[in-house]
Image (cartoon, rainbow, N blue to C red):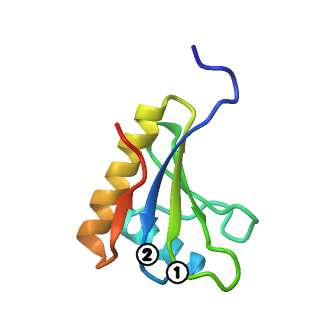
Amino acid sequence: MTTPGTEYCATLVVRDAVSKVDALAIIALALDRGVSDARGVHPYIALDGGARLEIEIPKFGEPPPLALDVYSPLSHEHAAMSALVVLGALETATAWTVKPDFVL
């Protein structure tokens, strides 16, 4: 049973050096979607089924990786499957090295 307000997360790790702004633009282009709250503190890309992608950037001065967090209000499986859709799009549209940081 899901508790109201619960969110599940599946993370993709990008091992390439890319800024958060550039990463959001590239991912949005690869997915053919817009960036919501682009000028806000927590910009995100809405995905199917109520999932969304947010980016966690390394702390100041730290090298990559860049964490692409996919959140779902439905289940961990939905978050993971949504993350795999993002992974597939990024493999097709970029030369990034992206690995899932979760198991199904």
Please provide percent x and percent y for residue 37: 68, 62
Image point (34%, 36%), residue name:
104
Q: Nearer the viewer, residue 12 or 20?
A: 12
Query: Circle 1 — which element?
Result: helix
Residue 7 falls left or right of residue 64: right
Q: Nearer the viewer, residue 86 or 13?
A: 13
Give residue 7's quadrant in the image.
top right
Q: Position of residue 8 (x, y in %)?
A: 56, 37
Give me the disc on residue 40: none
Q: Residues within 10 Å of mark 2 (few under 14, many from 20)?
A: some
Residue picked out by circle 2 = 26
Q: Are marks 2 and 1 in contact (CB under 8 Å)?
A: yes
Depicted 1 relative to depicted 24: above or below = above
- Residue type at numbered disc 1: Asp
- The single residue placed furthest to the front in the displayed view is 62
- The percent coordinates of residue 48 (x first, y second) are 43, 43
Q: Quadrant of the N terminus?
A: top right
The residue that label 1 is drawn on is: 22
What amino acid is labelled 2 in the image? Ile
